[in-house]
Image: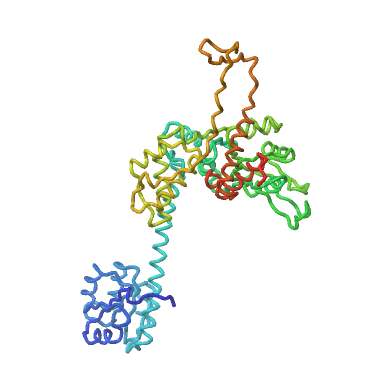
Amino acid sequence: MRDLDWNSFDVLVVDDEQDNLDAFRFAFRKSFKLHYALGGAEALSLLDRLDPAVIVADQRMPGMSGIEFLKQAKERRPDAAGVLLTAYADMTVLIDAVNSGAVDRYVQKPWNSKELAVILRQAIAGVATLRENRRLREQLAHYAGYLEREQRDPIDFGEIAGESEAMREVAAQIGEVAKAATHALIEGEEGAEKEVVARAIHVGSPREEQPFVKVTCAAFRGDALERELFGWRRGAFDGAFTERAGRLELAHRGTIYLDEPAPLTPSLQARLLRVLTDGELERLGSTETTRVDVRVVLSLTPGIEEAWVRAGVLPELVSRLSVFPLRLPPLRERREDIRALAEHFLRKVARRNARAATALSDEAIAKLTAYAWPGNTRELENVVERAAILSRGDVILPEHLAFTARPQPAEPPARAPKAADPEADATGKALAAPASSRPKLDLSSQLDDIERRELLAALERCGGNKAEVARQFGMQRTTLYYRLKRLGIDT
């Protein structure tokens, strides 16, 4: 039997004779929380302010029998278990009472205190279970409603909170692409709400009840991504001891979210293009064709699409994956959303940590708004969570906010022109060289050099701890590993 505090549950005892009530009091006063009533009318009046777990009633009472009283009591307190005490074994009346639901148990008089104690505990345990189940259903309904509001609000798709015109436009685009059957491309910087947008597209679509499958492509190297997406048959490669379905099959009738799928091998390009054009695939090592109906949502950081073209990715594949592009503006371009986002993240922290702060001061909001947010919303969430936990009171103040230090590339020294420089003006300042004579700049290489310097500086600062570097830059470790490998940083 459950380990319950029996004295925390009310038990109402009803009898028209005081001696019988006294006998009950003597037997059970130390075991249960007892209340007493002389007759059914007094007991019904008591039920207006008492919510007992168990009601014990004597059958033979003037004016109102025990069964009649329990029937009325059930209407007022339907959860309460009814126990009938009777000295008359009128089985027909008892059967009718039990079938009506008014009587849960009956005990013949004279009752045995040990047996009756067991009956009372069993009745209390049943009512306790009933009440706990109701509480859990209500809690589940509350959270289900909360999640429904979080996911379906036209402006606040979970973490896509804000009032800026840019995000209203994104929300409108999400609604349009969700209703269509087309594939989508989400472009945004590291730390932007790309996965949240992908989930919003899925939730707002007719595929909502079907699977949403996320693939973090940077976690797979070489041919591993192709295997993960398409699956394999037994013996297709060393270690393929059993047959396995790929993520594309698992996402059948639903949505698959590909996070940063780069680089793409020629084989993977051809297989993926076949899925997008014909809805067909074959597992590695198999000749059996499988039909799949799946929407592909792709996320990329700015510039990757151009890098695909330079790397020779099939133009038709690029075109298919770019049918409906959505650009997520970085947080620094929509500072009016920072307050709403910060308050959203703070509510999340408060739900997980009962002792965390629950409000942001105006000065803290001003400090958050003035920051550049190179790590976008992911960095904002980290900053808010850290401040909420470290603050001593209910309000986050400016001193509780700590931003990630990111080294900036040094400015190149200004070139001093020579006195005889024919391209210097009368003040000695260098004139701009003609466009035809300027060296061509490789912007991609320059950006790689900047990123390489920042990563190397961060690794040195963190003593080679890659997990700490990833945390400081607001990125996942798998993304960091991919970038280190791409930039040729061997640590």
Estimate the x, y position of residue 293 in percent, counting from the top left.
64, 43
Estimate the x, y position of residue 10 in percent, counting from the top left.
30, 74
Among the 4 quarters of the image, the one containing residue 95 = bottom left
Residue placed most toward the observer, 310 or 450 = 450
Q: Is residue 269 left or right of residue 57?
A: right
Q: Is residue 195 left or right of residue 34?
A: right
> Which image quarter holds the N terminus?
bottom left
Establish if 17 lies above or below 479.
below
Establish if 74 lies above or below 319.
below
Instruction: Kindly identify the residue that appears in the image at 38 percent across and 54 percent down.
Output: 356
- Number of marks in the rendered image: 0
Estimate the x, y position of residue 119 in percent, counting from the top left.
38, 81
Residue placed most toward the observer, 55 or 322 = 322
Q: Is residue 349 left or right of residue 457?
A: left
| Res. 184 visible in picture | no
Establish if 26 lies above or below 142.
below
Coloring applied to the structure: rainbow
Residue placed most toward the observer, 377 or 54 = 377
Instruction: Kindly identify the residue that appears in the image at 65 percent across and 22 percent down.
Output: 440
Estimate the x, y position of residue 136 in percent, counting from the top left.
42, 62
| Res. 244 visible in picture | yes
Instruction: Kindly identify the residue that appears in the image at 35 percent across and 46 percent down.
Output: 397
Establish if 83 lies above or below 287.
below
Can you name the residue that lies furthest to the front here? 419
